[in-house]
Structure formats: C-alpha cells, structure tokens
Image: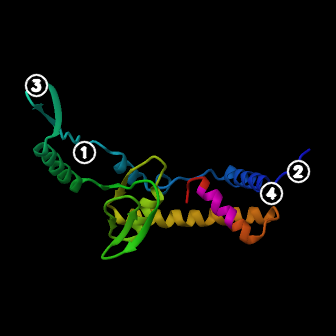
Amino acid sequence: MAKKRPEEILYELKEQVAEDVFKANPVKKFPDDFLPKKIKEELADVRNLPKLEFGTRSRAKGRDHRHKVGKLDFKRALAAHAQFKRIEAKMKFEVIVLPEGKFEFKIEKKIQICPENWPAPLEFGSFEDAKYVLYSRKKGQLVYKLPRDKTAVKKAVAKYERYLKKVREKLILAFVGRGAEKKRAAIMAKEVVREKGIG
C-alpha cells in the first residue's frame, strides 16, 4: 500500500473535521439565516419592481431597407430610469450591483468598495452596509438587496460575525484535537470556512 503524501493527509483531515463540526450544526448562510422574518419578506417582495424596457428603434441603412440596425431609444431609456428611481425611493431596500472578483476597501468621504475592472467604486454610508453586501456575496450573483432598515443590517452583521467566530473556534479546537499545531489549525479553519462559502 502506497504511503499517503502530506497534502493528502491534510485534505482528509480537513474533510473529516468539517464533516464532524457541521454535522451537528448545518452551515448557515448570510443574510437569510440572520435576518428577521419581516425583513426577509420585504426583500422577497418584487411586486413594485419596474420592468425596465429601454426599447430600440430601427433605422434604414443606405437605400436598402431590408437591413435594419437596432438603436437605443434614449427617450424611453431615460423615462424607464426615472420611473425606476421613483419606485426605488419607496422600496424597503437598495439594489446593489457587485461584480465577482477582487476588490479593495477605501475610506474617502464615504466607505467604498472598489472592485477590480469596474468603472466606479460602490459607496456606503457605514461599515455595516459594506460588510452586509460583502458577506452576501455568492458565486455567479451580481445583484444584491441591501435593506434600508439600518438596525436590521447592523444586527444581522453582528450576529453573523459572532457565528463565524464560533465556527472558526470549533474548527480550530477540532484540528488541535486531531494533533495539528495551533497555527496550522487556524489556517485550515480559515480554508474550511472559505470552502464552505461562509466567510
């Protein structure tokens, strides 16, 4: 029987510890598991979201009227945007577009998240708002809903950070219990949390 390589042993240890830790306590996902029912209902309510129809106009190209070229109808686009802004002001949440990939934090007049390859930074009124959006990130998702109820945002973020701390502590203890050094245990705990998509 071939001797296992160190990376195989570490992989198996990570898998076993993660399975043991999350067996009794299934993984919780942000924000759904950390928001009150009322806020979740508000975020799920899409009845007031407008259907933005920018529309196109066709124009003839040269003398041959069989070839049509689509052109953005700016008048309709501006009307749709104005309609969206009116409705958005009444909604219980803000719509945030955050691309996947790397980003950096900046503090100018407001807290900013500056995604790589994105034309403008995203600005937030508080760290809690920025953290809420970052904790909400999911692979393949670009659009996020940030509740306007700042007390709910603050509580959800605090609750989630307490949850993450407890999960990391449990994982570290489990790794140390299996013979890992504390520094290595902390690194593996961080990896497990990242792989589970919770931090």
Horizontal and vertical percent position of residue 120: 31, 62
**Earlier-in-chain disc, 3 versus 4:** 4
Which residue appears at 34% of the width and 67% of the height?
Answer: 124
Which residue appears at 15% of the width and 51% of the height?
Answer: 82
Determine which residue is flagged by label 2: 3
Is 175 on the left-hand or right-hand side of 68? Answer: right
- First to last magenta residue range: 187-194
Separation of marks 3 and 1 at Cα, in angstroms: 40 Å
**Earlier-in-chain disc, 3 versus 1:** 1
Indicate the amino acid at tag 4: Pro
Residue nearest the viewer, comparing 3 with 166: 3
Secondary structure at badge 3 equals strand
Determine which residue is flagged by label 1: 48
Determine which residue is flagged by label 4: 6
Indicate the amino acid at tag 2: Lys
Secondary structure at badge 1 equals loop
Separation of marks 3 and 4 at Cα, in angstroms: 70 Å
Labelled disc at residue 69: none
